[in-house]
Image (cartoon, grey):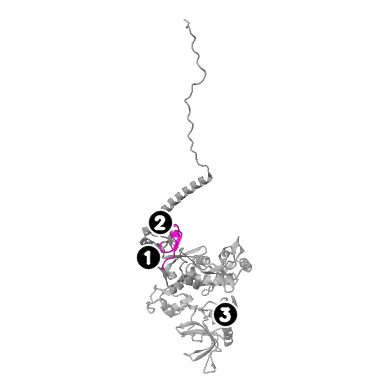
């Protein structure tokens, strides 16, 4: 069925929107002066607000009674504390003072520097700072360093600073050497610094301000090395290290040598230097050398030993004299003797070569007149019979059985002479002794004898010495025993001709070992 009207045609234009309102615009003043005035006003408001806040804060700080926050006493912060709290803190902190030399610092008891601090008075001074005295801004914002209250004792300070000098002094170092791959290389000299005691004490006495930061600067003076060129020392070391270090250990009692040879690569590491009035001289490290000698003592087994300190000194003396060879003495321990049937104190004394009175002293409380077989007694060290340093290379040997004397110089017989020893009633004692003294004419009152070129060698009994001498005389002219050499004719001494006695007297200084054989 057809409609009588055609269908309506839809329009192609979009529908109309509601009308828009124009945007609202705020119109600001555009004049520059106006803008500047607005900014200034805002800043003023901010500053006033800040000032009010600061004023209120400061009012609170100042009215609180606490120490203002930026305050320290001698470098100890006490800000914000009540006076009592600050006094307690300072009482512990001010017991020691930091002293300084450049970057070097030490803590020293305040009393050693003559200072006695008053912690409470120091805390009160801190509380006043920024209120009654000093800068309030520094007290609030810091740093505000307050000098502590103290008293000063100049005598105690002087003594304490002198003691401190031993700690802080830095001696100048002379030019020296070090070993690199076994070869000596020079080491440059260095300046030193020493404490000036009087000036330091004077500044301690005027301390206000010096300790405000808690540190006291010492007055130090420079010192300068006396040797600035090590080339001579390096040459000396090189020459020494061309040889081993030889230690000739010698036992004068047994006449035995125990040489020790230390290679340069070992003993070179012990070389040191020490200052002397002549500049720098070589020495050896005492600890390293002592350790080496202690090890040698262990090898000796105990009956013989080295006195390590004495041996170290002898070797050091040789190195200072620029020689790698030293002579040291070997010592002997006391021994034990087991009594045999028929033994008496006299026979034991003769057998061991030690005087009877010495054996008695070594065994206090022991009845030497009632010895029994199997009993053990102590024989003192035979070193007691050689009280002087043994003269190296010289030795006198006397034979009682052969009635003869041999004089040795560096192991070779220098003189071979007939001699006479003591008669049976007053015998010469065998043993190892030593020339103790010289007397060109000694007198023996017991026998009214004058003895030319007398050299005492052992104390037969306390206070009475036997020795070596030439033909004696009495009554001014009567010369004895000229025709008796080679027979036992003396009262315990050893007789040689007067001419030989004169030669021996001049040759054998005190210390020459004299061995008397049975």
Q: What span is in magenta?
A: 131-149
Query: In the figure, is residue 260 to the left or right of 127?
Result: right
Percent position (x, y) of residue 127?
39, 62
| Disc 1: which residue | 120
Crowd band around label 2 with a 10 angstrom C-alpha radius: few (<14), some (14–19), many (20+): some
Q: How many marks?
A: 3
Q: Is residue 125 left or right of residue 393?
A: left
The residue furthest top is 1
Q: Nearer the viewer, residue 67 or 132?
A: 132
Count residues near mark 1 (Cα–Cα under 10 Å), then give few for <14, some for 14-19, many for 20+: many
Disc 3 or disc 1, which is closer to the eye?
A: 1
Residue at which label 2 appears:
58
Numbered disc in front, either 2 or 3: 2
Which is more N-terminal, label 1 or label 3?
1
Q: Position of residue 282 (x, y in %)?
A: 58, 69
Q: Which mark is residue 406?
A: 3
In this view, the residue in front, 239 or 300, is: 239
Residue 361 placement: quadrant: bottom left
The answer to which of marks 2 and 3 sits earlier in the sequence is 2
Instruction: Kindly indicate the quadrant of the structure image that contains residue 501.
Output: bottom right
Instruction: Compare residues 139 and 390 and report the one nearer the observer.
Output: 139
Q: Position of residue 23 (x, y in %)?
A: 48, 33
Helix, strand or loop at disc 2?
helix
């Amino acid at each position: 069925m057809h409609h009588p009207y055609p269908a309506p045609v839809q329009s192609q234009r979009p529908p109309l929107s509601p009308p828009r309102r124009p945007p609202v615009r705020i119109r600001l003043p555009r004049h520059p002066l106006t803008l500047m005035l607005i900014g200034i006003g805002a800043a003023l408001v901010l500053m006033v607000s800040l000032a009010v806040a600061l004023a209120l804060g400061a009012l609170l700080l100042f009215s609180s009674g606490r120490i203002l926050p930026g305050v320290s006493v001698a470098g100890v912060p006490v800000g914000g504390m009540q006076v009592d709290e600050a006094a307690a803190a300072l009482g512990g902190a001010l017991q020691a003072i930091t002293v300084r030399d450049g970057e070097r610092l030490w803590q020293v008891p305040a009393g050693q520097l003559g200072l006695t601090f008053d912690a409470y008075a120091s805390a009160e001074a801190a509380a006043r700072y920024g209120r009654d005295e000093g800068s309030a801004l520094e007290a609030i914002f810091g740093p505000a360093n307050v000098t502590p209250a103290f008293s000063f004792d100049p005598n105690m300070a002087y003594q304490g600073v002198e003691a401190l000098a031993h700690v802080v002094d830095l001696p100048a170092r002379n030019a020296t050497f070090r070993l690199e791959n076994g070869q000596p290389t020079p080491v440059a000299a260095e300046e030193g610094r020493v404490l000036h005691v009087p000036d330091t004490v004077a500044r301690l006495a005027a301390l206000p301000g010096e300790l405000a930061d808690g540190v006291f600067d010492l007055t130090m003076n420079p010192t300068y090395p006396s040797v600035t060129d090590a080339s001579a020392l390096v040459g000396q070391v090189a020459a020494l290290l061309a040889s081993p270090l030889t230690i000739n250990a010698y036992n004068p009692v047994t006449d035995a040598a125990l040489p020790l040879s230390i290679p340069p690569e070992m003993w070179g590491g012990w070389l040191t230097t020490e200052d002397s009035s002549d500049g720098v001289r070589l020495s050896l490290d005492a600890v390293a050398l002592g350790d080496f000698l202690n090890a040698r003592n262990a090898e000796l087994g105990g009956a013989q030993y080295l006195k390590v300190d004495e041996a170290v000194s002898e070797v050091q003396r040789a190195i200072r004299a620029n020689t790698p060879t030293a002579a040291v003495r070997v010592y002997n321990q006391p021994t034990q003797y087991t009594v045999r049937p028929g033994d008496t104190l006299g026979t034991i004394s003769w057998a061991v070569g030690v005087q009877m009175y010495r054996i008695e002293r070594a065994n206090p409380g022991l009845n030497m007149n009632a010895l029994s077989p199997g009993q053990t007694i102590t024989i003192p060290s035979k070193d007691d019979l050689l009280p002087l340093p043994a003269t190296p290379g010289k030795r006198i040997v006397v034979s009682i059985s052969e009635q003869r004397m041999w004089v040795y110089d560096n192991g070779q017989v220098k003189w071979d002479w007939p001699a006479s020893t003591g008669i049976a009633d007053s015998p010469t004692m065998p043993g190892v002794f030593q020339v103790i003294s010289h007397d060109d004419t000694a007198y023996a009152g017991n026998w009214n004898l004058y003895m030319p070129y007398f050299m005492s060698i052992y104390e037969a009994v306390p206070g009475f010495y036997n020795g070596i001498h030439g033909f004696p005389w009495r009554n001014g002219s009567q010369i004895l025993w000229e025709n008796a050499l080679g027979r036992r004719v003396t009262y315990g001494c050893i007789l040689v001709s007067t001419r030989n006695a004169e030669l021996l007297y001049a040759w054998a200084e005190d210390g020459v070992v004299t061995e008397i054989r049975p």
